[in-house]
Image (tube, helix red, strand yellow):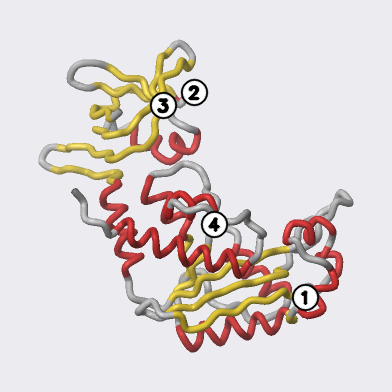
Amino acid sequence: MEIRGRVVDTIPSLRIIKAETRDRMYYVYLSRKMFRDFGPYFYETPYVLMEVDKKETHGKYSCYHLKAFTKIIKHIQRERRVFFDILEIQDSIRDIINRKENMLFIDLEYSLPSSRGYREKFIEIIQYGMVLYDKEGKKILEDHSLVKPNKKSSLNKNTLNFISREFKEFKDGVDYIVFYQTLEEILEKYDPKIVVWGNNDVPTLEKSFRINHLKPLKIRKRSLNLMQLIKNYYSLKNDLGLFETYELATNTKLEPQMHDAFEDAVVLKGLYDQFKKDINKKRI
C-alpha cells in the first residue's frame, strides 16, 4: 500500500510519524534503523511517498509498518528540496554497475574464535577464492587456495568445522605472502574493481596487511559491496545471505553452502550478472 502525504508530527519514543493526506491521517511505525536514518528529515515536515504493509498497535496508536520510502521532499516557495529519492539512487547504482571495468570477484574465509572461552588476538585469512574478468566480461583468470595461518591455534575446531576442512589439508596451502603477492600483481596489472559480499572482507584484508607486516594494498576505494548495492537499490532493511539472494534472483536452487571461498566467489559473479541484467530491464 502506498501513502502520499505530509509528515505533520513525530513521536520519537515510539518511532512513529503522523502523515496527513487529503482525506485522513496515517500513523506509520518505523524500524530503529529507518528512524535513525530518516528521522532528521521529519522535523522539516516534508512531503513523503512511502510503501507500508501490516497494521499493528504501538502504544495507543494503530500504525502501519513502513516498508520503504520512495521519496522525501519539501517545497520552499519555488524551490523543491529533495531529501531522498529512490529513483535517483537506483540511477546512480545502475551507473556504477554499468561501468566498463575489469572486475575481481573475491571471497575470503577467516579463522574463528576457539571454544576455550577466549578470542584470538587477531583473525587470520585461511582461504581465498577469486575470479577476474575483463571489461567485456571475459574471464582472465581464477585462483584459490587454503592459506597457512601464522598461528596454529587459528585452525581450531570451530574454524575447521565451519569450512569443512581437516588440519592436514593446510600443509598444501600457500603462505600468506603468496596470496598477498598474487593480489598485488592483479591490482597492478589489471587495475580492477574489487567486488565483495558484505562488510567483512575489505577490513579483514586491511588488517591482514598489518598482521603480516606488509605494505597496505589500496583496496577500499576500488571495492564494491554488492550486498549493500542490492539493499540500497531495493530499499531492503536487513543484511542478505549470498546463496539465498542468488537463489531468489535466479529462481534456482543451489547445493547447501559449504563455506568454500572459490565457490562463493563464483556465485558472487553470477549474482552480479543477474543483478545487472535485472536493473537494466526497460521500465514499463
Q: Is residue 225 left or right of residue 172?
A: left
* Crowd around label 4: few <14 · some 14–19 · many ≥20 (10 Å): some
> How far apart are the alpha carbons under marks 3 and 2?
16 Å
> How far apart are the alpha carbons under marks 3 and 4?
26 Å
Q: Label 3 sits on what residue type?
A: His
Q: Is residue 56 left or right of residue 75?
A: right
Residue 6, position in %: x, y? Answer: 25, 27
> How far apart are the alpha carbons under marks 1 and 2?
51 Å
> Dot 3: what SS?
strand
- The residue pinned by badge 4 equals 198
- The residue pinned by badge 3 equals 65
Q: Label 2 sits on what residue type?
A: Ser
Q: Which of disc 1 and disc 3 is earlier in sequence?
A: 3
Residue 13's tag is: 2
> Dot 2: what SS?
helix
Q: Which of disc 4 and disc 3 is earlier in sequence?
A: 3
> How far apart are the alpha carbons under marks 4 and 1?
24 Å
Q: Residue at x 57, y 78 (%)?
A: 217
Of circles 2 and 4, the one toward us is 4
> How far apart are the alpha carbons under marks 3 and 1?
49 Å
In this view of the protein, which residue sits in the foreground, 69 or 230? Answer: 230
